[in-house]
Amino acid sequence: MIPSELLYSRSHEWVKVQDQTALTGITFFAQEQLGDITFVELPQPGTDLEKGQEMGVVESVKAASEIYAPVSGQVVEVNHELENSPELINQDPYGRGWLVKIKVLGPVTGLISPEEYAGLVEGD
């Protein structure tokens, strides 16, 4: 399950860029590896992020895992629905389980295509 309209980071975040805003989340593969997600910690709106910087944590019954900013920019919105329903990431990682929206402050670079991401997860 790798949507073709998205871009991906090597640390298993997905990105949909529209009008200089990047909608982000973790991939189906990542949530599947974590198992049942029980808690999500996300940055506050207004937080400036550098690409690759830790922007949050996802905890599951198996482990806790850091989430890294796939692009540089400023957080403009977080998915508050996850505070009470973190399982949405398991149920709909590319839809209702989105994490943050980031106002992109430059060109989006260093992300990989769906085909490259498929190759990456096949190797894991």
Image (cartoon, rainbow, N blue to C red):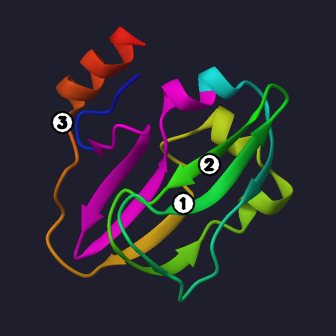
User: Could you say which disc has been placed on residue 66 in the image?
Assistant: 2
> In the image, what residue type sits under mark 1?
Glu
Q: As rendered, which of 93 and 45 lies closer to the eye?
A: 45
Residue occupying image coordinates x 74% and y 54% = 40
- Please tell me whether mark 2 sits on a helix, a strand or a loop: strand
The image quarter containing residue 104 is bottom left
Q: In the rendering, at what x and y percent does residue 61 appear?
A: 85, 29
Q: CA distance from mark 3 to mark 1?
A: 22 Å
> In the image, what residue type sits under mark 3?
Ser
Q: Are marks 3 and 2 in contact (CB under 8 Å)?
A: no
Give the quadrant of the N terminus: top left
Comes first in the chain, label 3 or label 2: 2
> In the image, what residue type sits under mark 2?
Glu
Comes first in the chain, label 1 or label 2: 1
Label 1, on which residue?
A: 54
Label 3, on which residue?
A: 113
Residue occupying image coordinates x 31% and y 55% = 16
Mark nearest the camera among 3 and 1 is: 1
- Please tell me whether mark 3 sits on a helix, a strand or a loop: loop
Mark 1 packing: few (<14 Cα in 10 Å), some, or many (20+)?
some
Q: Which residues are magenta?
A: 7-31
Query: Is 21 situated above or below 92?
Result: below
In the drawing, does residue 5 fall left or right of residue 32? Answer: left
In the drawing, does residue 41 fall left or right of residue 50? Answer: right
Question: Is 87 within the magenta?
Answer: no
